[in-house]
Image (cartoon, rainbow, N blue to C red):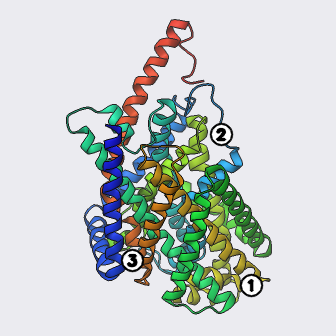
Amino acid sequence: MKSFTISTVFVLSILLCGGIGLWGVVDPASMTGAAQALTGFAFTSLDWFFLLLCTGFLALSIVLAVGPYGGIKLGHDDEEPEFSTASWIAMLFAGGMGAGLLFWGVAEPMHHYYSPPGMTGGTPEAARTAMVITNLHWGLHAWAIYAVCALVIAYFVFRKDAPSLISTPIRMTFSGRGINIWANTADVLAVLAVIFGLAGSLSMGTLQVRAGLGEVFGVEQTTAVSLYIVLVLAVTFMLSASTGLDKGIKILSNINMFLAVTMLLYIIFLGPTRFILETFTTTIGDYFSNLIAISFRLFPYQGLTEWTARWTLTYLIWWLAFGPFVGIFIARISRGRTIREFMIGVVLVPTLFSMLWFAALGGTGFYIEMFGPGGLSELVFEDVTKALFSFFNYFPLSQVLSVAAVLLIFIFLVTSADSGTFVVSMMTTNGSLNPPVPHRLVWAVIITALTVATLLTESIAAAKAMAVTGAIPFSLILIAQIIAFLRTLREDVAQIRAREAEAGHASAPVGE
């Protein structure tokens, strides 16, 4: 049955992804139009469902982190983590959203500052609101989605010695004549979500690399240049994919974190340092004090559902699209960590870093507009792909910063594509923790084709639509996964407590 399952998932995934990739290359406008129609329906008719679902991920993450299950290891009780904490965080961060922070670090806070929902823009209160909104999109909700997706897989794979597949929780928990069909469907939908999500993200990253090359070297902003960038990107991540997880991805992720932290410190200490740190401190208070309210806010009375769809829901469904990709990848690198350690490392640490990142880039952008020479907002709204490089022009050594940013974005794209091909290969080789290199290269070619198809539209909106398309049907699979996980966890904890009671220390914390 395993070989049949592998061939079914692999063949169906190849046919669907290859067919859609060919459709996109032949008629990109039609393909992206279909993607935008599907996402438009989800945004307008199911906005409440997706917001409740994603907030539920955050609530579950908190319960698992502080509850009685926190001491249970993702693996056998005597296992130790495979990677150091620093490398672990670097890899999960690079795979999760690294390039996105560079793309939107300046642009998004500026957008919300001048166009906040339901209030007047360009005011001090609008600036505070802009930072809260930005961190809603990039903070706890995003990383909680990743964490729960990863935790479910890691628990079954390392605690139960099961295959690293999206369908594993479903196969191991539920039964029935049609379970294999549903399980295969889950795996295929997961592959589609990963492939579409990567294609959209790689497209946006490529456009930003092109903009950076234009700012630094005067390169023309043409579709041909974008395709050359994708070609170099494809060759690079294929080479990285052939080196293995603890070489290519680990090394590139550590380089990424070093460059990102160096850039962040440069901006903090050569920019308005006091203002940045005050913005960071204020944002922490504003964000956490408003967390419950913003986690359920859809603006129905103000008639701003279109704004919610364009921003909040796009992000949340985007993170759902990356759930199977980042989830399986984070699970793969998290063996031997406790549930509590896992939740803190995957949810809280990256969120705090993201908040500091937006305080530095977005806060400095506010300072330029409020107390400095101004003019940044016009550049941001003119071309969002150039926002970061326009921002660097307000700093000394702006050319050096721009070159470093182009390199950083490119490496982030490589690690994302490399991680994505690794995960898709795992999902189509019965959950192999080290899938064969030729298998990864096949998926690398397909991801490249879909990225090219999306780039041919020359549209950020099309790239966003492409990125979230796969997540819409996959959200139902996530619900089934969580139900299976909670049911299995409850049964396992009951067994642990029974054994502890027999041994005479039933009061000891579970897993500790």
SS for callout 1? helix
Tag 3 and tag 2, C-beta contact below 8 Å: no
Give coordinates of residue 279: x percent, y percent: 66, 67
In percent of the image, x 35 and y 38: which residue is there?
A: 2
Give coordinates of residue 291: x percent, y percent: 49, 55
Q: Earlier in the sequence, mark 3 or mark 2?
A: 2
Residue under numbered circle 1 = 399
Q: Earlier in the sequence, mark 1 or mark 3?
A: 1
Residue 480 disc label? none
- Determine the CA span between mark 2 and mark 1: 39 Å
Residue 21 visible, this orientation: yes
In percent of the image, x 60 and y 56: which residue is there?
A: 93
Q: Which residue occupies the foreground of this view, 397 or 114?
A: 397
* Quadrant of image for the N terminus: top left
Amino acid carrying mark 1 in the image:
Gln
Q: Is residue 444 left or right of residue 247?
A: left
SS for callout 2? loop
Give coordinates of residue 331: x percent, y percent: 53, 44
Residue 462 disc label? 3
Residue under numbered circle 2 = 82
* Quadrant of image for the C terminus: top right
Amino acid carrying mark 2 in the image:
Glu
Q: Quadrant of residue 301?
A: bottom left
Q: Earlier in the sequence, mark 2 or mark 1?
A: 2
- Determine the CA span between mark 1 and mark 3: 30 Å
Q: Which residue occupies the foreground of this view, 482 or 287?
A: 482
Q: Residues within 10 Å of mark 1 (few under 14, many from 20)?
A: some
Q: Which residue occupies the foreground of this view, 335 or 44?
A: 335
- Determine the CA span between mark 3 and mark 2: 39 Å
Relative to 317, residue 146 above or below: above
